[in-house]
Amino acid sequence: MFDLSTEAVLFLVIAAFAAGFLDSIAGGGGLVTVPALLLAGFSPVESLGTNKLQSLFGTASATLAYAARGHVSVNKQLPFALLAFVAAAGGALMATVLPGDLLRTMLPLLLVAVALFFAVKPDLGDVDRARRITPLAFGLTLVPAIGFYDGVFGPGTGSFFMLAFVSLAGFGLLKATAHTKFLNFASNLGGFVAFALVGAVAWQIGLLMGAAQFAGARLGAGLAMRRGAGLIKPLLVVVCVALAVRLMMDDSHPLRLWLGV
């Protein structure tokens, strides 16, 4: 069925389950699955395309779980989801002509800044606070901007959505997580469509990983709804820092080259 060993398939399925669990709570599932696909022997572009396919199942699973408990209204968010979809598709198509090194240089710094925000902000909980931007302005500016970033590059998208929802929209952590998963599903779908059009998706292993993602995300979303901010906040900080470290481990990362390490 697969041009992979049984051990490699099992490794990717376990990675997808873990990624779905992690991503449904704090984002960062790509931190697990993209390196796993690369280790299994897929090319970088096929790893990104296949990751988009399997991550659709995880974000869809988490969205369904959160929506069933009333934490996100899918119907009300559909226009913004469409913007995220279109922006991500455009971003994926533009990925080859944009300055990728600039994104790679800045991303670890941005992720550490997000981690510091959630770590030192003492009053973050599950209760909504005063918003600093209208829902319309939020949907027309930040949603497509983050969606475009997801298509162009991807890592940290969930963390950036979370930061925007909490700091600007005034959402509590659980509500922000639920809305992040839906918009992340839309941006994943947009990126996936673009990668599929250029034939950069390994369908069989992607669908198998997707099933594992779905199960892991359902488990993670249930735990997040039971534990709330007490679980989401520390895990979000850990995921942001871990993703920044993982990016910096690449010997060709521009920051490492600039620092001479």
Image (cartoon, rainbow, N blue to C red):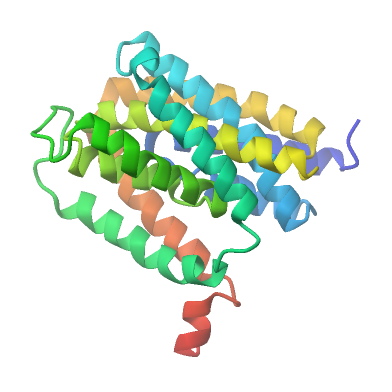
- Displayed quadrant of residue 163: top left
Find residue 33 and report its horizontal and vertical position in percent.
Answer: 62, 45
Q: Name the foreground residue: 210 vs 88.
A: 88
Answer with left or right where residue 205 lies relative to residue 228.
Answer: right
Residue 39, by quadrant, is bottom right
Answer with left or right where residue 229 lies relative to residue 59: left
Q: Is residue 11 visible?
A: no
- In the rendering, at what x and y percent does residue 90 appear? 57, 45
The answer to whether one can see residue 204 in this image is yes
Residue at image location 13% in from the left, 49% down from the top: 121
Q: Residue 157: give x, y in percent of width and height.
A: 44, 46
Location of the N terminus (image quadrant): top right
In the image, 23 versus 231, the foreground residue is 23
Q: Which of these two is toward me, 10 or 31? A: 31
- Residue found 48% across the figure and 71% down from its top: 102
In this rendering, position of residue 70 left or right of residue 43 = left
Q: Is residue 127 above or below residue 39?
A: above
Q: Residue at x 54, y 72 (%)?
A: 101
Q: Who is closer to the viewer here, 219 or 96?
A: 96
Q: How many marks?
A: 0
Q: Outermost residue toward the bottom?
A: 260
Query: Residue 92, relative to residue 261: is it above or below?
Result: above
Q: Please tell me whether residue 104 is drawn above or below residue 162 in the rendered image.
A: below
